[in-house]
Image: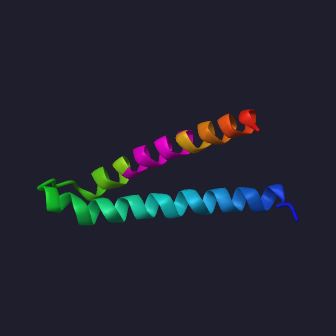
Amino acid sequence: MSQSRRMSLIEALTNVAVGYALAVAIQIIVFPWFGLQASLGDNLALGGVFTGVSLLRSYTLRRLFERLR
């Protein structure tokens, strides 16, 4: 059974939101282990950058594999 476009959008948005929250939480926990101090705003902005790069990577790979198929 195929997934509706609406459910695909909901899945993608959920994936992005969870990935963003996870990135920020991991940064807050891990950065101090390496002696890095970042404000909450910095962590939120950096999480946004990582999320954007992840979206671009995921889209590019999906299109590449679609072309190969």
Indicate left or right for 20 with 7 as reference. Answer: left
Is 68 drawn above or below residue 13 in the view shown?
A: above
> Which of the 4 image quadrants contains residue 61?
top right
Tally of numbered discs: 0
Residue under the point 28% across and 59% down: 40
Q: In the image shown, does 34 or 6 lie closer to the viewer?
A: 34
Residue at the left extreme, as displayed: 35
At x 74%, y 33%, the residue is: 67
In the rendered structure, the answer to whether residue 44 lies left or right of residue 18 reads left
Q: Image point 23% across, 56% down: which residue?
A: 39
Name the chief secondary structure element in magenta: helix
Query: Horizontal and vertical percent for residue 3?
Result: 82, 61
Q: In which quarter of the image is the C terminus?
A: top right
The colour scheme applied to this rendered structure is rainbow
Quadrant of image for the N terminus:
bottom right
Is residue 37 inside the magenta stretch? Answer: no
In-front residue for pair 3/52: 3
Relative to 37, residue 26 above or below: below
Say left or right for 8 vs 50.
Answer: right
**Does the magenta-highlighted stretch encompass residue 55?**
yes
User: Residue 41: horizontal and vertical position, in percent?
Assistant: 30, 54
Would you identify the image quadrant in which residue 35 lies? bottom left
The residue at 58%/44% (across/down) is: 58
38 relative to 14 in the view: left or right: left
Q: Where is residue 17 in the image (x, y as percent from the top left)?
A: 53, 61
Q: Give the image location of residue 18, x and y in percent.
A: 51, 64
- Image quarter of residue 14: bottom right
Q: Which residue range is magenta in the image?
A: 47-56
